[in-house]
Structures are given as C-alpha cells and as structure tokens.
Image (cartoon, helix red, strand yellow):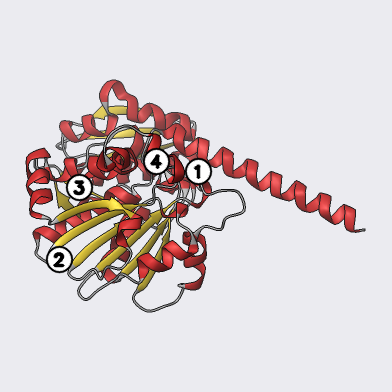
Amino acid sequence: MTEKIVMTNSDEATAAIFGAFDANVRIIERAFDVRISNRNTESTDGDAIVVTGEAENADAAARTLEYLKHMSGAGETLGEQSVEYVIALVKDNSEENPESLSRDVICVTNRGKPIKAKTLGQKKYVDTIRKNTVVLGLGPAGTGKTFLAVAMAVEALRNKSVNRIILTRPAVEAGERLGFLPGDLQSKIDPYLRPLYDALFEMLGAENYQRHMERGTIEIAPLAYMRGRTLDDSFIILDEAQNTTPEQMKMFLTRLGYNSKAVVTGDLSQTDLPFGKKSGLSIASKILEGIEGIGIYRFSERDVVRHHLVRKIISAYESYERDAESKKFRAEEKRGR
C-alpha cells in the first residue's frame, strides 16, 4: 500500500475539497479504490489530505485532489459534477488542465453570477466562437451548446460588438399541424423557442429581456422568418439545427451580413426530420470543414454538464448504435458471399 499526501493551506480549503458530508472524497474513493482521510498538521497552516491505496490508484486520486484544490482556490464550487469530470480526465491520462476553467468568465448574469465553461470542451467551444465568424457546435444533449452561445451573444451585445441578437430554431414538428395549436402565431411557435427564452431570462433577467425585446435588440423567431433578410451587426444563433433541411441551412448561412457572427448548434443523434430526409447540419459540417473563418467544434459525452446519468445514457445509446451498425454490416457482408 502507498500513501500520498496533498497539502491544503486552510481548514476551509480542506472542507471545500471534501464536500458536504465528505461526498466529494467518497466519489474519489469509489473511483480509484483508495481511502482518503484528513490529518491536521501543527507545524503548518492547513491540513494534510492522506490518500492510501495501491501505488497507481493513490497517485491518480492525489492528482484528482490537487486539481480540485486549485479549482476551489480559484473560486469554483466543487460538487459531484466537477469531481466526476476531473476523475474522467485523470483516468484518461489527459494532459489538459481543468484549472484554467476558473479564469475565463464568459458573461455575468443579471444577478451577478459569473458564467464559465464547466469542461475543457466547453472552453474550446467558446474559444472557437471568439476566433471565427461562423461556428458549428455539434454534440449530445446537455453539453451547453446553446446556453454558452447565448452567453457569448449577450456579452457581445453588452460590449456593443453587435447591435442585436437574433435567435432562431426550425419548428420541425409544426409543419401542417401548427394550425391545430391554440392561440395566435406567437403562441403557436413559443413552445419551440422556450429553451432560448430560458437562457436569455437567466442572463438578462425578465425586465431587461422585455426591454430588449421591445427595442428590437433581441429577436426570437422561427427559421422560416429568416428568408430574404440580410443580417448586419448581429449575433445570430440557430438552435436545433439538426432539424434543418440542406436548403434551410444554406438559406440561413447566406443571411450573414457585415460585422455579424453566427453560431449553429445541434445534436445529430436527435434528428426529428421525416424518414429519409437528410439533415442540413450534417451536410454543412462536412462541406464547410477547413474554410477560413468557419469553426466546427464537436463535443463528446464527457462534456455533458447535466446529471451524471445523462452522460451514461448517451454512452449506452452510442454503444448500442455502434453494435447495431456492426451487426448490419456483418449481415450484409454475409449475404454478399
């Protein structure tokens, strides 16, 4: 058995790492099959966190604790999500350092809460948006694609980098059935745009949001409303883009005007298009690769920031789909012999 020691500089730092009722260290103990205890030291300020276990496991657990110590020192609140994420990085022997997440504030909400990337994948996505005029963000549910894009848009509006924010989604399920929904047109399309409203409410607060809507500096509309327009001095976000047709995607991308930025987000595993219809996002991600000024960022299930079970559900579905494809290929190969 090996013993590794991680020093903290205060009792408060130790308490933050251990979490409420030692929840954080219990997660680390289960992940690496180690024991973690706290040892007060009279000769120095702070405590010694002692990790006991097999050499390789103890070393990995100690590295996890070191990362968490630095993140906590930078003001991060350590919970199950952040602990699980750091453990995943350590297990993958990733050379990427999660400490950098604490330093980059994307936007501050109306209540003064700083919005930061929660994973290194999210940070790379934000950096991709900063560096490019058009960005395609692809990835599974819960990776923060839309939320972070809205945060970047709000910050650009506050900094006067753009004059307005335009948010749009395709109302795929509407189609012919839109007329059966109660209310006027706005009432009919609101359910499709609700996630965009929610993100803006969190960033701006209800009162500021309403003021921007009345002034026209924020516009939320179905994708069909974009046809024929030229969008200058705007930050434009197309959400749920996996449900666009190739024609709709081309129409949207060609709306881009001067001093504008466009972010397109979507999850290709959750396409609601009619059977046999190709996704405009899928095609765009292939034909736009390598064009200067266009960035394409692909999230993985490791970037999911919802409940930890969401990550496992996504992983299970991906495994199932890979197995199904493999069986289909073997069956076709067998028939061809």
Q: Earlier in the sequence, mark 4 or mark 1?
A: 1
Q: Secondary structure at mark 4?
A: helix
Q: Residues within 10 Å of mark 2 (few under 14, many from 20)?
A: many
Which amino acid is tagged 4? Leu
Closer to the camera: disc 1 or disc 2? 2
Q: Is residue 73 shown left or right of residue 273?
A: left
Q: Residue at coordinates 45% horizontally, 44% vertically from top-left?
A: 176
- CB atoms at circles 2 and 3 under 8 Å apart? no
Q: Quadrant of residue 228?
A: bottom left
Q: Secondary structure at mark 3?
A: strand
**Disc 4 designates what residue?**
178
- Nearer to the camera, 229 or 200: 229
Which amino acid is tagged 1? Glu
Q: Disc 2 versus disc 3: distance between alpha carbons? A: 20 Å
**Disc 2 designates what residue?**
162
| Residue 204, position as x, y percentages in the image | 12, 45
Q: Earlier in the sequence, mark 3 or mark 1?
A: 1
- CB atoms at circles 3 and 4 under 8 Å apart? no
**Disc 1 designates what residue?**
56
